[in-house]
Amino acid sequence: MSASPRVLAIANQKGGVGKTTTAINLGTSLAAVGRRTLLLDIDPQGNASTGLGVPKTARRSTMYDVLVAEQPLAGAIVPSSVPGLDLAPADADLSGVEIELGTQARRSYRLRDAIAALGSGGESYDYILIDCPPSLNLLTVNAMTAADAVLVPLQCEFFALEGLTQLMRTVELVRGSLNPKLEIQGVVLTMYDRRNSLSLHVEQDVRAHFGDKVYQTVIPRNVRVSEAPSFGKPVLVYDLQCAGSQAYMKLASELIAREKSRRTAVSAA
């Protein structure tokens, strides 16, 4: 990996699409294969923090302090129970960011500035994953402004493409005004049920629209994936052998391969 971490915003303005589940388990999978990973939880619900077993009492400094009070990101980072995976937690205070930052200068760059300062302090990560809230607000704009690329979890449901189109418009707006390098890293189909013809139809539609941007790996609907957060564990720790765990490991391998191809292409250009 290069010295600079690859920053990926995991975003979808629709709730319940497996966004936080993907952030937790992709981060765990990357750490499991030796990629040091930092997960930034910027969702006021704090589900990524809870899902990694970090109780609210242990969140002494959070992403709220980083974004609003401009405290150093390094001070908010805590180790998770997964070796190689660290977390900067969230809490409900983040819900007030939009109002508190108001019209302050560089309010859309708070997260990017914090990540840049983290690197100058000597902390080293291969990947930084940002778990965004299920809305297109200032927090999501901060994530996209800070990110190299956006990873989109997409539930296999009827309105999937409609929501994805809205997200793409937001990506274009951010690219045009705040972050010219922003790209779509990939689209991940989640909650896939092979017994349901709707999942197949959604997959066909999404692949027809976005081609090779759609990951070959799909995340199946799996009860063990749903159970794991209630135990404060990634599903790979909760049940490594289940279909959901195996899918997230494959997703991490495919992501790493994509990133290697991207770096090769950039070097050759």
Image (tube, rainbow, N blue to C red):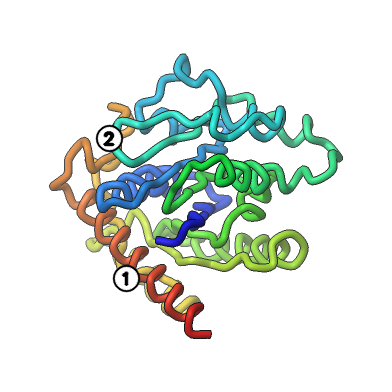
The picture quadrant where one finds residue 251 is: bottom left
Secondary structure state at the residue bearing disc 2? helix
Snapshot quadrant of residue 28? top left
Q: Residue furthest top?
A: 57
Q: Is residue 44 left or right of residue 157?
A: right
Task: Give the Cα separation between the discs numbered 1 and 2.
Answer: 24 Å
Above or below for 200 versus 71? below
Q: Give the residue number, with chain letter if any, for mark 2.
A: 228
| Residue 117, numbered circle | none
| The image quarter in which residue 188 lies | bottom left
Left or right: residue 117 compared with residue 186: right
45 or 111: which is nearer to us?
111
Which residue is drawn at the image coordinates 48% and 79% (left, top)?
A: 267
Q: Residue 22 vs residue 236: left or right?
A: right
What residue did someone put label 1 on?
Answer: 216
Tell me what residue is drawn at x 65 percent, y 48 percent: 112
Q: Amino acid at mark 1?
A: Gln
Q: Residue 36 location in percent, x, y?
A: 37, 47
Q: Position of residue 234 (x, y in %)?
A: 29, 38
- 36 relative position to 163: left or right: left
Q: Quadrant of the N terminus?
A: bottom left
Look at the image and tell me whether residue 133 can be seen: no
Residue 25, image x, y percentages: 33, 46
Going 61% across and 49% down the picture, which residue do you hit?
143
Residue type highlighted by circle 2: Ala
How many residues crowd around disc 2 within 10 Å: few (fewer than 14), some, or many (20 or more)? some
The residue carrying pointer 1 sits among few (fewer than 14), some (14 to 19) or many (20 or more) residues within 10 Å by Cα, namely some
